[in-house]
Image (tube, rainbow, N blue to C red):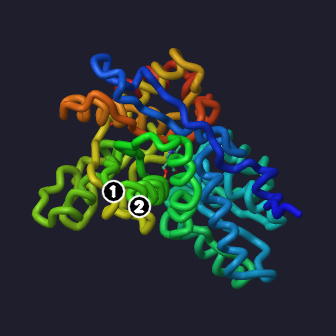
């Protein structure tokens, strides 16, 4: 009898297409190619289905039959992915969301069967989730995608090998990814480095995030941070903004980030990334979400860097983490979009 993991087969996690995006090549070097992995083809429409499965399975492995409830704190893709993975395993799911999260997103997560609890203004929703899980004892696990290393493990074991297979033996020269938990860049990055240590792993970081500075300080203790103070906080006047492009950047370095496998970090303005999202969505049938624009922008920059280093051919891989359907209320609001595309943050 063939041994099939029915849950996984049914939900079709992974096996997402890797497509060539010609418009991201420099016009003078079209053979420096950018390929994007289209993660919206996962069951709940994002890259986070991959980690949700690993985090929930790990919780089951820890607690066995005692486990009744999965608890997570997320306002974004992880919320619906964890809700779906919990339902698949017959477990209850409670998601804590920040006060500012839209009603639309709350409803999406609830539609996967989760109970969603909105934090009050000024309440730390991560802490609420942790305390709630602790109050339930061994019946519950707080997944904590930021610090639980099963996150990057999912990408190391699944997404990375898929990319190598997708490339069918073609050389991979660079891998570009934004970071929030850091699971995507660290897991895929480590897998690709094991495959070929010459592959350049590049982290894209928005202007109001500490990860760029923390990365260069990790490499060189004498590095003078641009955006943060010596103790790792944003400088006065630098407000961390996570509303323009969701799922990118961070105020602290999560456990899932492994700076040792990253070779280079690049800063970008969110407004520029959104302009590229518009351009890609208007000129292709890819229909990408906001963070994909950031990945596309930095992949384009790395392509230009490789061309200026004299390369005529190269393959750059990046991730399109979700699709435009997750951002309808923003992308279809021309006032928001016009304003956001002009923002230098
Ligand atoms: C749309 C989107 N893109 C990119 C990321 C970043 O991925 P990671 O958390 O693995 O760093 C996230 C994470 O929240 C996301 O939701």
Q: Which residue is mark 1?
A: 197
Depth check: give the residue in front, 95 or 277.
Answer: 277
Expressed as whole percent of the image width and height from the top left, the position of residue 285 reads 59, 21
Q: Residue at x 42, y 32 (%)?
A: 34
Q: Residue at x 32, y 62 (%)?
A: 259
Depth check: give the residue in front, 179 or 106.
Answer: 179
Expressed as whole percent of the image width and height from the top left, the position of residue 104 reads 68, 39
Expressed as whole percent of the image width and height from the top left, the position of residue 253 reads 36, 63
The answer to whether residue 76 of the structure is visible from this angle is no
Q: Is residue 72 above or below residue 97?
A: below
Which residue is the extreme one toward the right? 1
Depth check: give the residue in front, 142 or 334.
Answer: 142
Q: Residue at x 71, y 84 (%)?
A: 138
Q: Secondary structure at mark 2?
A: helix
Query: Looking at the rendering, which quadrant does residue 116 occupy?
Result: bottom right
Residue 5 shown left or right of residue 274 in the figure? right
Q: Residue at x 46, y 19 (%)?
A: 279
Q: Is residue 25 above or below residue 166?
A: above
Q: Which residue is mark 2?
A: 194
Residue 285 shown left or right of residue 257 in the figure? right
Q: Quadrant of the N terminus?
A: bottom right
Expressed as whole percent of the image width and height from the top left, the position of residue 39 reads 59, 41
Q: Does the CB distance between marks 1 and 2 fall below 8 Å?
A: yes
């Amino acid at each position: 009898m063939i041994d099939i993991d029915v849950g996984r087969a049914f939900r079709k996690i992974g096996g997402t297409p890797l497509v060539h995006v010609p418009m991201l090549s420099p016009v003078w070097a079209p053979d420096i190619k950018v390929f994007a992995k289209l993660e919206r083809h996962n069951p709940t429409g994002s890259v986070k289905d991959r980690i949700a499965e690993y985090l929930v399975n790990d919780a089951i492995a820890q607690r066995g039959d005692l486990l009744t409830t999965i608890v997570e704190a997320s306002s974004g893709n992880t919320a619906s992915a964890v809700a779906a993975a919990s339902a698949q395993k017959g477990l209850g799911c409670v998601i804590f969301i920040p006060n500012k999260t839209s009603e639309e997103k709350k409803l999406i997560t609830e539609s996967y069967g989760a109970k969603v609890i909105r934090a009050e203004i000024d309440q730390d929703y991560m802490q609420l989730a942790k305390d709630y899980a602790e109050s339930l004892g061994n019946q519950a696990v707080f997944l904590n995608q930021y610090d639980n290393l099963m996150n990057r493990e999912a990408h190391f074991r699944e997404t990375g090998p898929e990319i190598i297979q997708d490339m069918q033996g073609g050389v991979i020269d660079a891998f570009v990814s934004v970071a929030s938990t850091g699971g995507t860049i660290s897991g895929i990055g480590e897998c690709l480095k094991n495959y070929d240590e010459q592959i350049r792993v590049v982290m894209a970081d928005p202007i109001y995030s500490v990860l760029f500075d923390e990365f260069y300080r990790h490499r060189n203790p004498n590095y003078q941070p641009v955006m943060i103070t010596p103790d790792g906080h944003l400088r006065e006047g630098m407000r961390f903004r996570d509303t323009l492009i969701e799922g990118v950047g961070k105020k602290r370095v999560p456990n899932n980030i492994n700076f040792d496998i990253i070779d280079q970090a690049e800063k970008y303005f969110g407004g520029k990334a959104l302009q590229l999202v518009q351009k890609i969505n208007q000129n292709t049938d890819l229909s990408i979400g906001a963070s994909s624009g950031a990945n596309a922008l930095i992949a384009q920059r790395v392509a230009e860097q490789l061309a200026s280093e004299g390369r005529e051919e190269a393959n750059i891989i990046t991730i399109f983490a979700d699709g435009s359907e997750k951002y309808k209320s923003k992308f279809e609001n021309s006032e928001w979009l016009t304003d956001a595309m002009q923002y230098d943050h």
